[in-house]
Image (tube, rainbow, N blue to C red):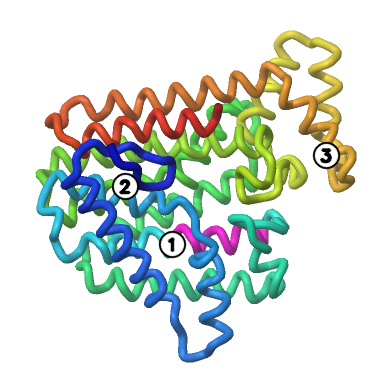
Amino acid sequence: MTVVGPFGLSVRDQALEADVQAGLTAVEEGLLEATKSEVPFITEAAQHLVRAGGKRFRPLLVMLTAQFGDRYAPGIVPSAVVVELTHLATLYHDDVMDEAAVRRGVDSANTRWGNSVAVLTGDFLFARASHILADLGPEAVRVQAEAFERLVTGQILETAGPQDGRDPVEHYLDVLSGKTGSLVAVSCRFGAMMSGADETVVDVLTQYGERLGVAFQLADDVLDIASDSHESGKTPGTDLREGIPTMPVLRLRERAARLGLAEDVALSELLDSDLSDDARLAEALAQLRVHPALEQARRDTVRYAEDARASLAPLPEMGAKAALMELCDAVVHRAG
């Protein structure tokens, strides 16, 4: 058994492990090449998060799903570079919106160089992703464009909040499907599509990616509260401080409205208050970490991960399928 990928994924198939490792190495080289500029400062800013590391979750999915067709097809590595560049670009923009100080264990770009540079660097990465994408054909461009539209729509929906009468939890799950599920789904779609896999296989893997992406973000919601900065690579409670209602907060509010318990109402009021003060944020985190709402958010994560696993049922038994199923377990494990 060898270990590969972002979550210590166990791969028991030596040929699969070799293919995935070789693919991820090529993606890493492609990321560094794609983020070079004739202007040294742009290169430094664009490679800031690339060199900080990261899980490379989306490229890993491209490599695994490519196993269902010709795993050596020429479009596989470039498409993995495209999805990772797109993801990295959104991180630069997210950190500006969230006023985040830390990303992947290093200063965020907005902390180091300011908001304007961070936003423009994200735009630079989008441009480089589009340049690579153009060589992959019109269908790849269309798939990526639709995913990017969904990603931006999810971000806007999160910012706008649910309409009157809409269940906040259902609204939030729609947000996650767009904001995170769309690009994870495209990672799976590109791997299968570029390898020439059967269209039914492409569809199955796309559905898997959508559900896994939501589970992945729900696990991040739990980590934002339950972990320390060393474990998560970013400042705990960032979403709380910005007033972003992630799943644990939504489950708390739901419980407070349903049961009316004084301690739930008091914690909800604390979360709705100004958490710019470090002591108040620490108190909010401490209370949420032992609250049943956090466990409910973990159960939500498990549900989506199990749905992702179940969606793989029609696929043939092979090492890549086993690895994709294990990724479902790994995502749940991240949430504790």
Q: Quadrant of the N terminus?
A: top left
81 drawn magenta: no
Q: Quadrant of the C terminus?
A: top right
Left or right side of 247 for 260: right
- Secondary structure under tag 1 reads helix
| Image vertical order of residue 217 relative to residue 112, above or below | above
Of mark 2 and mark 3, the one earlier in the sequence is 2
Q: Which residues are magenta?
A: 87-97
**The image quarter in which residue 327 lies:** top left
Q: Quadrant of residue 80?
A: bottom left
Is 88 inside the magenta-drawn segment?
yes
Left or right of 266, for residue 24: left
Q: Is residue 67 left or right of residue 83?
A: left
Report which residue position mark 3 lands on.
281
Mark 1 neighbour density, 10 Å: few (under 14) some (14–19) many (20 or more):
many
Pick whichever of labels 1 and 3 is earlier in the sequence. 1
Q: Amino acid at mark 2?
A: Leu
Q: Label 2, on which residue?
A: 61
Q: Are marks 2 and 1 in contact (CB under 8 Å)?
A: no
User: At x 85% / y 32%, what residue is drawn?
Assistant: 283
Q: Main secondary structure of the magenta part?
A: helix
Q: Position of residue 308 (x, y in %)?
A: 34, 29
Q: Amino acid at mark 1?
A: Thr
- Name which residue type carries label 3: Leu
Residue 296 circle label: none
What element does badge 3 sit on? helix
Instruction: From the image, state whether disc 2 or disc 1 is nearer to you.
Output: 2
Q: Position of residue 262 (x, y in %)?
A: 85, 13
**Residue receiving disc 1:** 86
